[in-house]
Image (cartoon, rainbow, N blue to C red):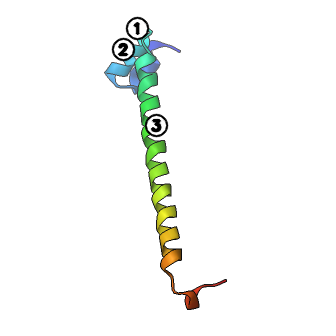
Amino acid sequence: MTTDSFQLACTTCANSFQEAGGNAAGWAIMFMVIVVVSMLGAIGFFMVRIARREAVALDPQYRDD
């Protein structure tokens, strides 16, 4: 990989990779993965919570089972 191929990255990341300091980019990616996974988990938790509360409050005559 040549230094010309780093033109796709922002200047901070490109300089970081050229100086062998790619650790910051790795931590940034890990942080974003943690944020995305936690948001998806929260959305899933609230979907399950809403579905359970709806099932408890539903009138028995309208149930499918």
Residue named by callout 1 = 19
SS category of the residue bearing label 2: helix
Percent of width and height locating residue 26? 46, 23
Q: Alpha-carbon neighbours of circle 2 within 10 Å: few (<14), some, or many (≥20)?
A: some
State the residue in front, 36 or 57.
57
Query: What amino acid type should be assigned to the residue bearing mark 3?
Result: Ile
Q: Residue at image x 52%, y 69%?
A: 52
Query: What's the distance in space between the residues labelled 1 and 2, CA to CA?
Result: 6 Å
Query: What amino acid type should be assigned to the residue bearing mark 2?
Result: Asn
Q: Is residue 59 above or below residue 10?
A: below
Foreground disc of the pair 2, 3: 3
Q: Residue at image x 51%, y 87%?
A: 59
SS category of the residue bearing label 3: helix
Residue named by callout 3 = 34
Callouts 1 and 2 close, C-beta under 8 Å = yes
In the image, 23: left or right of 64?
left
Percent of width and height locating residue 47? 48, 62
Residue named by callout 2 = 15
